[in-house]
Image: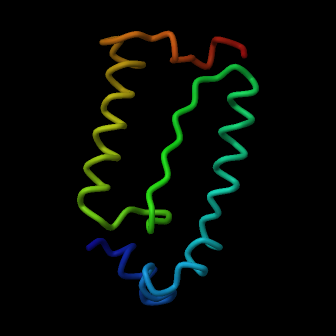
């Protein structure tokens, strides 16, 4: 486990035992609002929420999924290894 996770658990307790505290610390509603705003501007958005995880992922299977999703995005949008129709660069002015 990371130092950050140990630090957070020392102050907030275990996520599975203190879900309300963790949800308040990392409100998914705010992330969803940002995603909606970007979609409304014509941006491509891929948001994924994991059950019983907040800011910082503790379960190895979720850490792997996050890395795989990130690498896939890098491959598609930065390395141009796949369809780039869903990728926007800052110079798109949208």
Which residue is painted at 72% across and 46% down in the image? 33
Pinpoint residue 83: horizontal percent, then vertical percent. 40, 10
User: As drawn, is 68 to the left or to the right of 36?
Assistant: left
Q: How is the image coloured?
A: rainbow
Q: In which quadrant of the rendered image does the C terminus lie? A: top right
Which residue is painted at 31% across and 55% down in the image? 62
Pinpoint residue 35: horizontal percent, then vertical percent. 65, 39
Pinpoint residue 25: horizontal percent, then vertical percent. 61, 72
In the figure, 11 relative to 32: above or below? Answer: below
In the figure, 71 relative to 19: above or below? Answer: above
In the figure, 67 relative to 37: above or below? Answer: below
Pinpoint residue 43: horizontal percent, then vertical percent. 64, 23
Which residue is painted at 61% across and 19% down in the image? 90
Which residue is painted at 30% across and 46% down in the image? 65
Q: Quadrant of residue 3?
A: bottom left
Q: In which quadrant of the rendered image does the N terminus lie? A: bottom left
Q: Nearer the viewer, residue 1 or 34?
A: 34
């Amino acid at each position: 486990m990371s130092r950050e996770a140990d630090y957070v658990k020392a102050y907030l307790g275990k996520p599975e035992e203190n879900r309300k505290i963790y949800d308040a610390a990392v409100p998914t509603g705010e992330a969803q609002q940002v995603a909606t705003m970007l979609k409304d501007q014509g941006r491509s958005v891929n948001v994924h929420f994991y059950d019983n995880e907040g800011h910082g992922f503790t379960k190895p299977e979720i850490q792997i999924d996050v890395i795989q999703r990130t690498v896939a995005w890098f491959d598609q949008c930065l390395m141009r290894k796949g369809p780039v129709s869903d990728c926007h660069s800052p110079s798109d002015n949208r």
